[in-house]
Amino acid sequence: MPNVNFSSISRSARRPAAIAFLAAVLSFSLIGCGEDKADAPAALPKVVAVEVQTAKVPLSYTFNGVLTAKETVEIRARVSGYLAQRLFEEGSLVQAGTVLYKLDDRDLKAALDTAKANTAKAKASWENEKTTKDRMVALADKGAVSLQMRDNAVAKADEAWAAYQAAQADEEKAAVNLGYATITASTTGYINRSNVEVGSYVDTGGATLMTTIYNIDPIRAEFAVTDEEYARFKKALANWSGQKPTLIFHLTLGDERIPYDQVGTLEMTDPVIDPKTNTLGVRVDFPNPDHRLRPGMYANVIAITGEREVLVVPEEAVLDQANSKSVYVVNEQNTLVAAPVTVGELIDQDLVVTEGLKAGQKVVVEGLVTARPGLKVNVTMRPPAPVSGTAEGYSTVTEAAPQEAPAPVTDPASAAPAAESTPAANPAPAAD
């Protein structure tokens, strides 16, 4: 074997071997790191949950009503004549006694002057006949004139007195007619547009409707109840737990059910049920100091007869799925269970749950996009918001109608995963 001098091997010949050695070391290091990552446990999905809470809410009945004015006064002329002045702004608020119209009153003034003259003439005639009567009575007592002459004098005096009374009545009537030429508002309220223009002839006898005034403080809500609703309503009053049965009425306005901040009082109910509609008319007065409510508006009239205890959950916890609703419940093992629920009315931001849950259960309100039955999660609890629905407050609810119990459901482990934001078609029953 020939002698090799390693020191004579060039530096360039040793460089590829060093590079190959480093590549082998790096490949083993990378393989080791990948194995460490594969062995690390995956982080649990995070969700936010709240506890199902109980709340006392009003026991109430809701009716569809329409608002009407307390007084609707039609302004009509009581004497005929040409309209000389219109003294109000259409659509404005007018006070009782405000002058609205003035008619041309020259003929009426002349009639009053004539009536005054006739009264003076009748008075003078009566005074003369009275003097003659007194004289004849004195002479008849002395036998100086016959009884027939005395009786004639008495009759003429009485006739003159009657004529004087009639003349005074005509004068008073003429004065009243002259006053009717000035047409005033008989009540405080908003005045409608004028139906007559200056210079138009206004007829008497109610033939001409000049305008209309609406008194809207208080404003009235009129609605009808069926005989069954009326019977249930009376039963609720009989079971009232307070010292005295008291009705509390509220209004909500529009499709958004905006609450009105005034409490109404029962004004009247019809004494009989209409056999044609099988309903009973009811009228409730509501204060309207800022005139925000106007006649013709539709509103929901809510009659509160007591309180009831219910379960409530945040609205965002309830998922809609076809014809059913459900929530995700976190059980003791921090596993999600899809629970079907029956819900009632909305109170503030919470929904009343009538079936499917128990007080103290944890329902998911955040993280629903990735939620599915059987998923183990990392739970963060959020304190529940207070519920403000009380019989004295503005938050009002309607008695929930009875509904069928939900159909039986399968075990969460066998339930198929659902779409992103909804539970499975057959969710599992709720955990305690």
Image (spheres, rainbow, N blue to C red):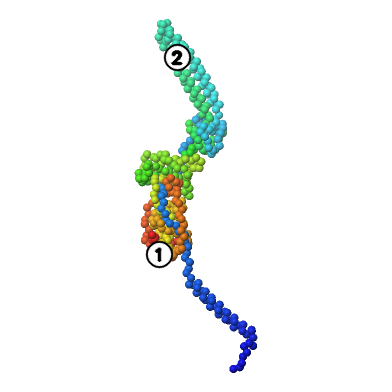
Closer to the camera, 313 or 75? 313
Residue ID at (55%, 80%): 24
Q: Is residue 88 left or right of residue 378?
A: right
Closer to the camera, 193 or 219? 219
Residue ID at (39%, 49%): 308
Q: Which quadrant would the C terminus be assigned to in this image?
A: bottom left
Q: Dot 2: few (<14), some (14–19), or many (≥20) neighbours within 10 Å?
A: many
Q: Nearer the viewer, mark 1 or mark 2?
A: 1
Image coordinates of residue 419 in percent, x first then y, are 46, 63
> Is residue 20 positioned above or below 167 on the image?
below
Image coordinates of residue 153 in percent, x first then y, are 44, 12
Residue ID at (39%, 46%): 306
Please, what is the three-letter code of the amino acid marked with disc 1? Pro
Q: Dot 1: few (<14), some (14–19), or many (≥20) neighbours within 10 Å?
A: many
Sequence-wise, the earlier of marks 1 and 2 is 2
SS at mark 2 in the image: helix
Image coordinates of residue 91 in percent, x first then y, are 53, 39
Q: Is residue 315 left or right of residue 407?
A: right
**Does residue 230 appear in the picture of this structure?**
no
Residue ID at (45%, 51%): 386
Kindly identify which residue carries mark 2.
Answer: 157
SS at mark 1 in the image: helix
Please, what is the three-letter code of the amino acid marked with disc 2? Ala
User: What's the mark number on residue 158?
Assistant: none
> Is residue 206 positioned above or below 396 on the image?
above
User: What's the mark number on residue 412?
Assistant: 1
**Residue lying farthest to the bottom in this orientation:** 1
Asked if labels 2 and 1 touch by Cβ distance under 8 angstroms, the answer is no
Image coordinates of residue 39 in percent, x first then y, are 48, 72
Q: Which quadrant would the N terminus be assigned to in this image?
A: bottom right
